Structures are given as C-alpha cells and as structure tokens.
Image: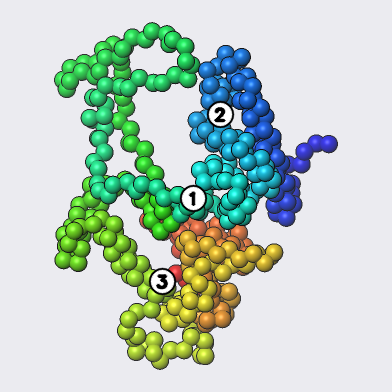
C-alpha cells in the first residue's frame, strides 16, 4: 500500500500520524539501546576493529558526538535499571532525562524519581537532580574571550583521533607570518567570518540556585560596570548576581507596567474612575491600563488560547492582548472580550477571522511599511487586532 503524502492529510489525521510516528520512533530507540547494550557486553566493537564503543558509533553508525554520547550513557543507565524501558517507550522519559537521572537513581528511589521526572523537560529534570545532589557553582566574575586575531596567531591544537592505533605522520602546519609577511604557499588566509554566537546557558547547581553563563559585547559589559558603580551603596561588595537581580527586577517592573502585568504603586485618577467591565469601553485600539491588568491577572500572565480538545496553551512568550470579538467587527475593549494570547495564537485567531490570504497580504504590507515602501495596513487591522 503506497504511503499517503502528508500534504494529503487534514490537520486531525496529520496530528494522529505524528503521534503514531513518535511512538514508533521511541520503540525503535529503545530497541537500539537494548541492541547496543548487548553489543557492548560482547565487546563486539573490538572484533570489528575499533578501540571503543564510542569510536564504533561515530565511524560505523555515523552518529555525531552528542547523539553517540546520549545513547551510550542512556544505555548504561537502562542496563542498571531495566524497568526504565516502559518509561522510555511511552515517552515519560527521554534519552537526555534518563542520562541525568542516572546520576542519582537507586533501586529505592526509582519509582518516585521516575514519577517526578515524567514528561518533564531536560532543564526541569536537571533541576530535580541538582536538588538531590548539589553541584559546585562556577566562580562569579567576567572573563574576556580571546579575539579572532589572537586566536588565529596561536598555534593550532592537534585534533584527537578516535582510533587507538598509531596515527599516520603529519607535517606540522606553520603559523601565519607576522604582519607584512606572506603566508607559506600551503597555507591560505582564513576568511574574516563573524564568530558564531555562543549560546547562553542556565543550569541548576542546587534546589534553589542556578549558574548563568552568557557572552556579552563590550557595550553591555561597560553598562554592567556602570550599573555596579551606581549600586555601590546598595550592593557594596559589587556582587554580580545581586546587580543582575536588581537590573532584572527594574526591567520587569518597567515592562510589566507597560504590559499591564504589574499595577503601579499609585493609581491614576483616570484608572480609579474606570471599572474593568461594568461599562463598555469605546471602540478604540487603546485599552485602559486597569483593564489590561485585570485581564493579565485573570489569565495568569499566560496565553489563554484553548484548543478544540480543551488543552490551554499557557505560553509566557510574546504575549499580547487579543480581542475575542475583533474591534473591526464591533468588539469592545472589555474584560469579557479580552484575553491574553501568545503571538502565534493571536495570529491564528486573526487568520480564522479574516482568512489566511488576507493576513498574509497584511503582513507583506507591514513589512513594506517597515522597510520604507508604500502600503498601509487594512483599516480593520489598524483598529486594534494587535492589542499589545
């Protein structure tokens, strides 16, 4: 029977097929781990001419380093605790979370920890593990990264090989010549490409402590030093964590007030005289601050979009205020007609109301406006569909 193309399925069948494929993938993954365990037990990789299971995974199975490491470590945890097989098959645990739990699992705490880690993200399970087995936090401070020029002039480190046997002799590559000189004929100058942006990392070190590693530019570093100086009376020891907390708190207060998530300390006269839903507001794109706060409080600062199966989105990313009945169609800026929605679900609501083709045209016109080209947004959209 020929396979049905995904484009031929409606959204319900497509979602069903995705669930089926995800379950099949988990089953294959568990079978892979069980076979890998037996292969490792026999040391069959040695018979195949490889010094380690790691080398075999990289060179024969063509797994990348991260994928090979996760599978080998998950396999060894599964070998210690075979009962984890069911949790891996039904999706309660994944390779990354099993690998993390292996640090603290015992026969006694196995049922409890599997239950607490079920369907959790890697970061959540990492926090759970750190709450049971505290880690040493990295030392606080700033460290300057080497610039490209100094890195290019440094001698290259030899690359490690996965084979344990003697490597073939290689000629050393001479370092680049000094400024004004020429490079050897066998060495070409490296193109001046931008350095890849380092990924920020937040990792739990205890139940209530996290370490933060982030790369910042010179301007941000100077601003951080200026803020540390300005806070020197409040934070005399210049503790970087305390400075960042103060900066984040102030930013949350500032943007929270703008979004309506935080009530100001002093209530404005206009707000005191306004009731959230007793009297309908005029059809305007401006939503009173007190109404914004009430909507935010009612929806818990999370996207209130509910799927047909009853599942609520609950996202906290790129939140906006969405008119359930759009202003352009007679909707009012009242508590009952407003909800918090993430940007994707606000857009989905607009597409359901006005049609995807209409919204695509509006987005193209919005891009033209931002880039200085002609084109205006439709009046129906300008009246406050994007109520942020």
From the viewer's perspective, is 90 left or right of 56? right
User: Looking at this view, is 35 or 322 the one in front?
Assistant: 35
Indicate which disc residue 129 carries.
1
User: Looking at this view, is 287 or 374 the one in front?
Assistant: 287
Q: Earlier in the sequence, mark 2 or mark 3?
A: 2
Q: Where's the N terminus, which quadrant?
A: top right
Residue occupied by mark 2: 63
Indicate which label's residue lies in the foreground, 1 or 3: 1
Q: Could you tell me if the residues under marks 2 and 3 are in contact, i.e. CB atoms within 8 Å?
A: no
Q: Is residue 234 above or below residue 4?
A: below
Determine which quarter of the picture holds residue 176: top left
Q: Could you tell me if the residues under marks 2 and 1 are in contact, i.e. CB atoms within 8 Å?
A: no
Indicate which label's residue lies in the foreground, 2 or 1: 1
Q: CA distance from mark 2 to mark 1?
A: 27 Å
From the viewer's perspective, is 103 left or right of 93? left
Q: Which element carries disc 2, helix, strand or loop?
A: loop
- What x and y, as percent, mark residue 255? 36, 68
Q: Earlier in the sequence, mark 1 or mark 3?
A: 1
Q: Is residue 228 above or below residue 95?
A: below
Residue occupied by mark 3: 259
Q: CA distance from mark 2 to mark 3?
A: 46 Å
């Amino acid at each position: 029977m020929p396979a049905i193309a995904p484009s031929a399925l409606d959204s319900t069948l497509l979602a069903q097929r995705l669930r089926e494929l995800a379950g099949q993938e988990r089953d294959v993954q568990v079978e892979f781990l069980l076979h890998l365990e037996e292969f490792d037990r026999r040391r069959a990789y040695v018979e195949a001419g490889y010094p380690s299971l790691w080398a075999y995974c990289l060179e024969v199975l063509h797994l990348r380093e991260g994928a090979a490491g996760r599978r080998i470590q998950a396999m060894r945890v599964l070998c210690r605790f075979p009962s984890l097989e069911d949790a891996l098959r039904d999706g309660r645990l994944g390779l990354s979370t099993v690998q993390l739990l292996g640090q603290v699992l015992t026969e006694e705490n196995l049922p409890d920890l599997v239950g607490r880690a079920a369907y959790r993200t890697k970061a959540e399970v990492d926090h759970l593990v750190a709450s049971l087995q505290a880690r040493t936090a990295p030392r606080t401070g700033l460290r300057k990264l080497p610039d490209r020029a100094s890195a290019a002039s440094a001698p290259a480190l030899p690359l490690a090989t996965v084979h344990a046997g003697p490597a073939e002799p290689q000629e050393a590559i001479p370092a680049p010549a000094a400024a004004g000189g020429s490079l050897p004929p066998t060495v070409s100058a490296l193109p001046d490409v931008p350095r890849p942006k380092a990924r920020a990392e937040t990792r739990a070190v205890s139940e209530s402590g996290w370490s933060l590693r982030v790369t910042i530019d010179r301007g941000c570093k100077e601003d951080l030093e200026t803020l540390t100086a300005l806070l020197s009376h409040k934070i005399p020891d210049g503790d970087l964590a305390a400075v960042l907390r103060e900066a984040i708190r102030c930013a949350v207060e500032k943007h929270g007030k703008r979004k309506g998530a935080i009530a100001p300390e002093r209530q404005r006269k206009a707000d005191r005289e306004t009731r959230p839903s007793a009297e309908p507001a005029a059809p305007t794109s401006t939503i009173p601050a007190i109404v914004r706060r009430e909507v935010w409080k009612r929806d818990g600062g999370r996207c209130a979009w509910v799927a047909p199966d009853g599942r609520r989105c609950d996202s906290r990313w790129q939140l906006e205020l969405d008119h359930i009945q759009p202003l352009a169609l007679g909707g009012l800026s009242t508590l009952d007609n407003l909800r918090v929605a993430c940007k994707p679900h606000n857009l989905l609501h607009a597409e359901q109301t006005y049609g995807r083709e209409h919204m695509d045209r509006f987005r193209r016109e919005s891009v033209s406006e931002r880039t200085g080209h002609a084109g205006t947004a439709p009046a129906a959209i300008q009246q406050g569909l994007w109520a942020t």
